[in-house]
Image (spheres, rainbow, N blue to C red):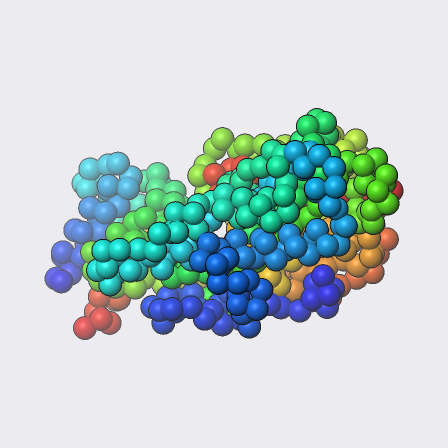
């Protein structure tokens, strides 16, 4: 959050094996990370990088929340995390071994390391959460879907609390090579909403939160950071990669309706804002469609300009910007902004963070495949 | 590869994307007229790169700013010929 408030850019040179054979040389890569400083040997043989990120984030979230799953019925706490690729580091390394190096044997734990639900499983094991737990994979909307479903599970009365968020670690040769093929990646930076934008930049990492039923949290004297007040999802049902203004608008409108909000109640939107030509103008159009005149009064920024696109983990990391807005009154900027684009004519908080009192913040996520998920937060009651 | 072959191969690639006969692909036709959308274009460029063993400088975010003219079929052929010649 501190980095977001400072408008610091985490995008730099991509340092992975065979990077010289890639056309894309930049990413929001986690640097200076020593896995052995956080996990023991017997853990690391089972933890892909995306699982490690999820576990570290979950540990911080659980410490901060003070929730002790085992203190009451552990089946009343579950885990729902988003990821798109799952254990891609494991997959990439082991494909190399068998295809490139011709080995005929791989480590026995390849399957439990690479499976998409590995992070969710390890978080549930680590914290003893025995309630409903699963992984959601809806590409770039995975985390928002995961957090929205966690919210629904609590609202339905099925559980009291959920550990939720998302994680991704797609910065591997095969992962970047695949994205290069689509020709939507930028070689020089992520500049959402700027007329000079030329594509997305990938990032990696995780964010995890503890969602808890309000009275349950109050009863144990929890430090409540923000309140989740609404969620909606929609499907474009139109194109596998091109975003739909109508589909995005339906998800945004649905979230406002679910939260019983008027457009003018919303002070800040954390945009999906990928920095591609198509997303940013479609998103701005959808926001105008739903918010109408109120669109001119709200702030909307894309923090992907700083941390890159974490694909299945992105909504979780971006929820941090929404929390910062409602809790601290600091609006994360859209950095790298160079030139206005008439098709993105909203207040996108260019380059420098801003102080503003915000009651309600909304986070957008629109995935490839036309799957949209929008979540709304309010300042802690 | 001879110039005539470049043309023929590109027409064949575009025709496949457009689900047309090669004879229907005229030099002044645009991709839009032929019914090739952005995803089809990206796939056609991949096929061109594979066929001629070249690297096509094309960013789907801003086709008009890319160093590769896709305004019509003739322009694409010319751009590929330049890239093939540069390869030597």
Between A206 and A78, the residue placed more toward the observer is A78
| Rendered location of residue A64, percent (x, y) | 75, 54
> Where is residue B53, by image quadrant?
bottom left
Between A12 and B35, the residue placed more toward the observer is A12
Instruction: Decide: is A20 above or below A253.
Output: below
> Where is residue A97, by image quadrant?
bottom left
The residue lying at 82 percent from left, 57 percent from top is A328
| Rendered location of residue A91, percent (x, y) | 37, 53
The residue lying at 86 percent from left, 39 percent from top is A219
Q: Is any part of residue A2 visible from this angle?
A: yes
Q: Is any part of residue A280 visible from this angle?
A: no
The residue lying at 86 percent from left, 53 percent from top is A357
Between A150 and A305, the residue placed more toward the observer is A150
Instruction: Decide: is A270 above or below B53.
Output: above
Instruction: Decide: is A79 above or below A22.
Output: above
**In-image side of A342 versus A368 (left or right):** right
Please identify the quadrant where the C terminus of chain A is shown.
top right
């Amino acid at each position: 959050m501190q980095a977001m408030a400072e408008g610091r850019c985490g995008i730099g040179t991509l340092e992975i094996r065979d990077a010289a054979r890639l056309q894309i040389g930049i990413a929001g890569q986690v640097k200076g990370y020593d896995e052995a400083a956080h996990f023991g040997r017997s853990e690391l043989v089972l933890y892909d990088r995306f699982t490690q990120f999820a576990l570290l984030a979950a540990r911080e979230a659980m410490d901060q929340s003070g929730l002790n799953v085992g203190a009451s019925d552990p089946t009343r706490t579950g885990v729902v995390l988003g990821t798109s690729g799952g254990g891609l580091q494991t997959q990439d390394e082991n494909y190399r071994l068998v295809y490139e190096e011709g080995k005929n044997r791989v480590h026995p734990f390849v399957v439990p390391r690479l499976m998409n639900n590995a992070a969710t499983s390890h978080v549930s094991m680590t914290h003893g959460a025995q309630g409903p737990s699963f992984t959601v994979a809806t590409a770039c909307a995975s985390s928002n879907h995961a957090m929205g479903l966690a919210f629904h599970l609590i609202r339905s009365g099925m559980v009291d609390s959920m550990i939720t968020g998302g994680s991704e670690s797609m910065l591997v040769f095969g992962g970047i090579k695949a994205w290069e093929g689509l020709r939507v990646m930028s070689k020089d930076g992520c500049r959402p909403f700027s007329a000079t934008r030329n594509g997305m930049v990938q990032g990696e990492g995780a964010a995890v939160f503890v969602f808890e039923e309000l009275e349950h949290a109050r009863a144990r004297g929890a430090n409540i950071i923000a309140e989740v007040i609404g969620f909606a999802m929609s499907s474009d049902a139109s194109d596998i990669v091109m975003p739909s203004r109508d589909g995005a608008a339906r998800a945004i409108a649905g979230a406002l309706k679910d939260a019983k909000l008027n457009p003018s109640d919303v002070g800040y939107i954390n945009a999906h804002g990928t920095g591609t030509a198509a997303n940013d103008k479609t998103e701005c159009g959808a926001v105008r469609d739903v918010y109408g005149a109120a669109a001119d009064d709200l702030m909307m920024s894309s923090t992907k300009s700083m941390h890159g696109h974490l694909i299945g983990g992105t909504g979780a990391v971006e929820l941090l910007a929404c929390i910062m807005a409602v809790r601290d009154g600091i609006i994360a900027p859209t950095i790298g902004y160079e030139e206005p684009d008439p098709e993105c004519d909203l207040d996108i908080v260019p380059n420098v963070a801003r102080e503003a009192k915000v009651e309600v913040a909304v986070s957008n996520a629109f995935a490839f495949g036309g799957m949209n998920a929008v979540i709304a937060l309010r300042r802690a009651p | 590869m001879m110039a005539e072959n470049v043309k023929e191969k590109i027409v064949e690639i575009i025709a496949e994307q457009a689900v047309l006969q090669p004879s229907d692909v005229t030099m002044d036709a645009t991709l839009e007229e032929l019914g090739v959308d952005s995803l089809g274009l990206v796939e056609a460029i991949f096929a061109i790169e594979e066929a001629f063993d070249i690297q096509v400088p094309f960013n789907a975010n801003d086709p008009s700013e890319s160093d590769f003219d896709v305004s019509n079929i003739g322009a694409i052929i010319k751009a590929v010929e330049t890239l093939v010649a540069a390869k030597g």
